[in-house]
Image: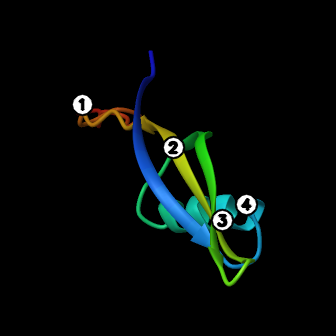
């Protein structure tokens, strides 16, 4: 049985919403293994002088919690 955990993060891009999402996933993947999904909670844009200068995305990223029990899992016992 899998156990999942999720974290809420905010990301920003000067290119697009899609780039902001990809940037967040790429960065999060550097420190967390087992990413499974990203749910967009909120989209917003930063405006300066009547122009959109950046796109912000609030994400809920879900990842699988690794099983650390079973110290010899997958290892064969030595025969005596």
Q: Earlier in the sequence, mark 2 or mark 4?
A: 4
Residue sitting at x 30%, y 33%: 77
Mark 3 crowdedness (10 Å alpha carbons): few <14, some 14-19, many ≥20: many
Q: Residue furthest top?
A: 1
Mark 2 crowdedness (10 Å alpha carbons): few <14, some 14-19, many ≥20: some
Residue sitting at x 43%, y 55%: 32
Mark linked to residue 69: 1
Q: Picture coordinates of residue 53 (x, y %)?
A: 68, 79
Q: Picture coordinates of residue 34 (x, y %)?
A: 51, 45
Left or right of 61? Residue 47 is: right
Q: Which of marks 2 and 1 is nearer the N terminus?
A: 2
Q: Give the alpha-carbon distance from disc 1 to disc 4, as whole Å.
A: 39 Å
Residue annotated with mark 2: 61
Q: Which of marks 3 and 2 is nearer the N terminus?
A: 3
In this rendered view, identify the residue nearer to me: 76 or 47: 47
Marks 3, 1: nearer the viewer: 3
């Amino acid at each position: 049985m899998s156990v999942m955990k999720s974290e809420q993060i905010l990301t920003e891009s000067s290119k697009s919403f899609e780039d902001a999402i990809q940037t967040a996933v790429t960065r999060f993947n550097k420190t967390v293994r087992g990413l499974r999904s990203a749910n967009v909670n909120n989209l917003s844009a930063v405006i300066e002088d009547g122009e959109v200068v950046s796109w912000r995305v609030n994400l809920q990223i879900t990842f699988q919690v690794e099983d650390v029990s079973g110290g010899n899992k997958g290892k064969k016992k030595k025969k005596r």
